[in-house]
Image (cartoon, grey):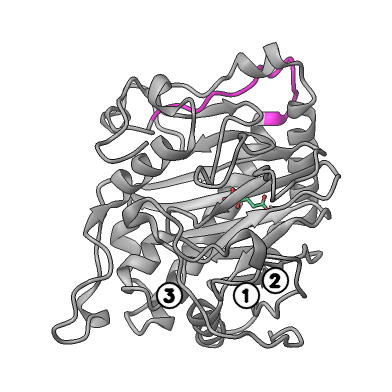
Amino acid sequence: MGLLQSASLSGQAGADGNHDGKLASAPPVAASQAATALAVPVVSLAASEEEAAAVLHQACLEHGFFYLCDHGIPEELIADTFKQQRAFFELCIEQKLAVAADSNYRGYTPMAEETLDPGRSRRGDTHEGLYFGREVAADSPEAQLPLHGPNQWPAEELLPGYRATTEAYQAAVAQLGFRLLRLLGIGLGLGADYFQPFFTHPMYFLRPLHYSAERSDEAAGLFAAGAHSDYGMLTLLCTDDVPGLQICTDGATWRPVPPLPGHLIVNLGDMLCRWTNGKYKSTVHRVINSGRERFSLPFFFEPNFDARVEALPQFLKAGQPPLFPPTTAGQHLLDKYHSTHAGYGQAAGTEAPAGEA
Ligand SMILES: O=C(O)CCC(=O)C(=O)O
């Protein structure tokens, strides 16, 4: 375990500006020129839980991002998962649309369907993707909840082994999510099991992404993935070797977080920022494409749909109002889907919530 050699950081900023639908800490275009890489901490799961939790805690206070090594997901499984996703995205559009995102928003979302930074983007983001949630049988009572139900898989004859490989990767990364929950609880002084009750029926989503080779053009409002903070608890990201991810921790400067062989990139989402009343950072990030096709595998680890998310009393100073109004994990996710996915309202048969675009 250790830290990468440091590049000093000036100041810090939590993102989750989402209570008003805006990203308060994304820097303006003029201020966001390319900058040096950031010294993102490295958490090793080979260390004891206490040691790992201490490094993780510091990373959450300062960056909201860390690299994760010794995570235990076999290299071969990662390579096979990327290979299968490439095969899916190479299918013709009709074949991909055969599993178009359904009313639970599980399935395929075409190129430019998502706009993560609607305030700055002039076109949809230059990626296509797939959502695979925790598998929920159609006849389960849980399937009554928005976003819950069976996943949509491409036919086995079309992509042999696709489902088995993707499910194996998803199971491995979900297990990691639960390990990190323990470290978060320890790091915050709440106890290793503190967050478990919020994750008895977690909403998690593996989201294989394919970025086209189109160059991003910030001045023209064209992004591979526009500036945003993540909506849930944690994101565990595996990327290919093409750089592109940038984060903004100081409200002014975008800095690259390059892929590191054998490491996942983990970042905190809005739920942790809200539970800790901003103590932990839900850091704004984006993807800028410099002309190469790119694949990534974000895994969004979210609490139960009905988990109440509001500042925990431990993180409120006397007389201080919470930074964010209370919400639930499910409602927050639905609000964000409505504001960033062109197809969500139609697919789910719902109107955008009041106050959202
Ligand atoms: O592909 C990446 O590197 C990041 C993806 C991302 O930010 C997201 O899906 O929220």
What is the quadrant of residue 235 in the picture? bottom right
- Measured as percent of width and height from the top left, residue 307 is found at 26, 53
Amino acid at dot 1: Leu
Vertical arrangement, residue 216 with respect to residue 159, above or below: below
Q: Which residues are magenta?
A: 149-162
Which residue does the image show at 44% across and 63% down from the upper left?
24
Q: How far is disc 1 from disc 2 in space, using C-alphas?
A: 5 Å
Could you tell me which residue is drawn at 64 percent across and 44 percent down?
A: 221
Disc 3 versus disc 1: nearer the observer: 3
- Position of residue 210 relative to residue 270, above or below, is above
Question: Local crowd at mark 2 within 10 Å, few (<14), some, or many (≥20)?
Answer: some
**Tag 2 secondary structure:** loop
Q: Nearer the viewer, mark 3 or mark 2?
A: 3
- Foreground of the two, 254 or 201: 254
Q: Which mark is residue 233?
A: none
Residue drawn at point x = 72 percent, y = 38 percent: 210
For residue 55: magenta? no
Q: Are marks 1 and 2 in contact (CB under 8 Å)?
A: yes
Under 8 Å from ligand 1: the CB of mark 3? no
Which residue is labeled 3 in the image? 280
Q: Secondary structure at mark 3?
A: loop
Q: Is mark 1 within 8 Å of ligand 1?
A: no
Q: 170 above or below 283? A: above
Quadrant occupied by the N terminus: bottom right
Tag 3: amino acid? Tyr
Which residue bears the numbered disc 1?
45
Q: Quadrant of residue 241?
A: bottom right
What separation in Å lies between label 3 and label 2 (alpha carbons)? 24 Å
Give the amino acid type for the residue marked by disc 2 in the picture: Asp
Query: Badge 2 is on which residue?
Result: 70
Q: Position of residue 98 (x, y in %)?
A: 61, 13
